[in-house]
């Protein structure tokens, strides 16, 4: 992750921001609902005022007149918070009483006067709420309009009161939730901090699993993963150490021999007398170089190395390895034959390692087989790709078969310059390819039969 | 030089006891191929390829006929063609 955000901040933001958003939506809704109910309450009084003014309108002989007694005007002035204005005019556009400039409701369409009309407007630089009503009379065509306006101080005060009583607890709720979440998250994330401290406090050599003391599943998943990784690392390091110890041990003996032979050669005065010692020196050096290259193959076939398996043609590979071994076999008058193999068998594998596997099996057969013996290589593609190499050599006793697959094991009293790694290499490379190695007695030739069965990785 | 056979690639011929050894051009090609890789396996495909440059494709049986003829002709000069089953042929100096 490139952008290192705190989990805590992220959770907090994801919870608190939507919460705030909901509060805002709620506030807007509350505003409209409150406005509706406040207007309903105060409009009733406004309508009362309109009705009481209407009672003061008289008709005498078709003449409309308004007589406002002081008591009637009083009702508009008793209020200290709000100013009240009124206007009464007739359809002939005559002002009968009140403020001439009081705005009237205007609409582009036909007015529906069956109900009183309420609307907001501005008057004397103040917002006002106006109620208007039309009066019709039976004995004249003239129509009278009555308008009462009131400033909105009381309404606004009430609006603020209601909104505050509604919103403040909600804001407090968000705030408290935020604080609670913050401390809760701190506590909840504590195991992670503890875990980080535990891991940071470890020495590089300590590969013991992390103790499973954590309650939360999420943390447990994390520790499980780390423990698996630690276990793999432990295994890998152990394998490496075992390998190094083995290798050092195996290299020491031939090196001591080399030193001895060199000393022997140095003791001789005559150059011809040195010859046998030098010959031996060369043989030992050859053996050393063989051992070293075998060790390298073994190190390469360690499963801890990173592998990419590619499609490999097992048939072609077998052909190449057999061809390469023929000259060596001929030196011992041995015959290598490949029983008509399928044209190609594709498997997933590492070409170099598979070559090493086959070379080692064949090399063993050539080295330990009888003079003028036979080696028969078979390749099958069904049911699974399978390589069978059998010879008419001395074979391997049943009791020894498991042991020869182990590293550095040599059959007691066996001839040749082997280092005891050949079949171990075969087994380990086979394991990398999920292949099984079986050693048996060859029914056909009487010697050893080695079967490598590639059950796992068949390339398409 | 293998056995008593001596390959002269510059003049495309094979000498026996310093005298030219008469071979068809196909036989020469096969023997040259085998001699250049004495002691190593030469696959049937490789031999067929070498022969195929003469014209049509060459069957495995045709290769076998060439090998059979060559075997007969060279065996008395201390050279033999061995068959490696499933792999091919190789030329070796005969053990007397």
Image (tube, coloured by chain):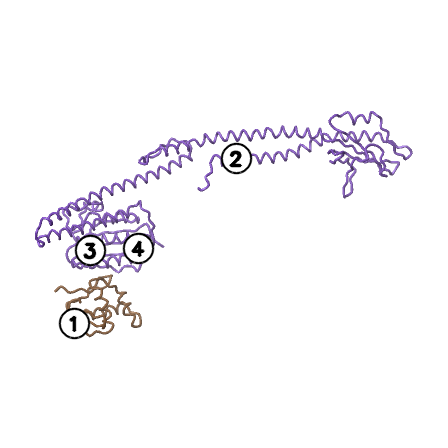
Image coords of residue A401 (percent x, y): 20, 47
Q: CA distance from mark 1 to mark 3?
A: 43 Å
User: According to the image, label 1 marks what residue?
Assistant: B16
User: According to the image, label 3 marks what residue?
Assistant: A444
Nearest to the eye among marks 1 and 3: give it: 1
Crowding at mark 1 (Cα within 10 Å: few <14, some 14-19, many 20+): some
Which structural element holds mark 1? strand
Image coords of residue A399 (percent x, y): 18, 45
**Does A200 sit above or below residue A281?**
above
Image hue for chain A = purple
Q: Can you say which quadrant of the picture contains the N terminus of chain A?
A: top left
* Chain of the residue that carries numbered disc 2 in the rendered image: A
| Marks 1 and 3 belong to one chain | no
Image coords of residue A352 (percent x, y): 28, 53
User: According to the image, label 2 marks what residue?
Assistant: A15
Q: CA distance from mark 4 to mark 1?
A: 50 Å
* Chain of the residue that carries numbered disc 1 in the rendered image: B
Nearest to the eye among marks 2 and 4: give it: 2
Q: CA distance from mark 4 to mark 3?
A: 20 Å
Figure quadrant of residue A205: top left
- Whether residue A270 sits left or right of residue A132 in the image: it is left
Per the rendering, the mark at residue A382 is 4
Which structural element holds mark 3? loop
| Marks 3 and 2 belong to one chain | yes
């Amino acid at each position: 992750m490139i952008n290192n955000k705190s989990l805590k901040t992220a959770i907090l933001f994801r919870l608190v921001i939507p919460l705030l958003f909901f509060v805002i939506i709620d506030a807007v809704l509350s505003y409209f609902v409150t406005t509706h109910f406040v207007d309903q309450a105060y409009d009733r009084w406004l309508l009362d005022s309109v009705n009481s003014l209407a009672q003061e309108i008289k008709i005498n002989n078709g003449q409309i007149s308004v007589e406002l007694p002081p008591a009637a005007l009083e009702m508009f002035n008793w209020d200290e918070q709000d100013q009240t204005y009124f206007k009464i005019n007739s359809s002939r556009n005559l002002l009968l009483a009140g403020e001439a400039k009081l705005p009237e409701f205007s609409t582009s369409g036909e007015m529906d006067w069956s109900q009183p009309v309420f609307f907001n407007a501005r008057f004397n630089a103040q917002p006002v709420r106006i109620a208007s009503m039309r009066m019709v009379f039976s004995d004249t065509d003239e129509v009278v309009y009555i308008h009462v306006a009131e400033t909105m101080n009381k309404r606004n005060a009430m609006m603020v009161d209601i909104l505050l009583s509604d919103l403040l607890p909600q804001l407090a709720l968000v705030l408290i939730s935020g604080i609670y979440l913050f401390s809760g998250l701190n506590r909840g994330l504590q195991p992670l901090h503890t875990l980080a401290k535990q891991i940071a406090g470890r020495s590089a050599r300590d590969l013991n699993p992390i103790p499973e003391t954590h309650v939360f599943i999420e943390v447990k998943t994390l520790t499980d993963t780390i423990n698996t990784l630690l276990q793999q690392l432990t295994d890998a390091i152990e394998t490496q150490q075992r390998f190094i110890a083995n290798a050092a041990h195996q290299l020491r003996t031939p090196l001591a021999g080399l030193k001895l032979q060199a000393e022997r050669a140095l003791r001789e005065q005559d150059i011809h007398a040195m010859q046998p010692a030098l010959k031996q020196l060369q043989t030992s050096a050859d053996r050393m170089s063989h051992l070293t290259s075998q060790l390298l193959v073994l190190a390469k076939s360690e499963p801890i190395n990173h592998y990419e398996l590619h499609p490999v043609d097992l048939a072609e590979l077998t052909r190449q390895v057999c061809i390469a071994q023929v000259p060596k076999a001929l030196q011992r008058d041995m015959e290598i034959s490949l029983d008509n193999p399928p044209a190609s068998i594709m498997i997933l594998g590492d070409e170099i390692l598979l070559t090493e596997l086959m070379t080692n099996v064949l090399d063993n057969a050539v080295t330990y087989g009888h003079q003028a013996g036979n080696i028969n290589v078979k390749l099958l593609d069904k049911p699974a790709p399978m390589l069978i190499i059998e010879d008419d050599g001395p074979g391997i006793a049943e009791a020894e078969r498991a042991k020869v697959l182990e590293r550095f094991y040599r059959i007691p009293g066996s001839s040749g310059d082997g280092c005891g790694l050949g079949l171990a290499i075969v087994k380990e490379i086979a394991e990398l390819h999920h292949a099984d190695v079986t050693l048996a007695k060859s029914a056909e030739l009487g010697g050893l039969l080695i079967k490598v069965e590639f059950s796992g990785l068949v390339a398409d | 030089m293998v056995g008593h056979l001596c390959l002269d690639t510059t003049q495309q011929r094979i000498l026996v006891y310093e005298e030219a050894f008469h071979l068809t051009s196909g036989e020469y090609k096969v023997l040259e191929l085998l001699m250049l890789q004495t002691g190593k396996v030469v696959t049937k495909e490789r031999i067929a390829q070498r022969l195929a440059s003469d014209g049509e494709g060459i069957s495995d049986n045709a290769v076998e006929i060439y090998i059979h003829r060559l075997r007969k002709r060279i065996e008395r000069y201390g050279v033999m063609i061995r068959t490696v089953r499933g792999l091919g042929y190789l030329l070796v100096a005969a053990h007397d």
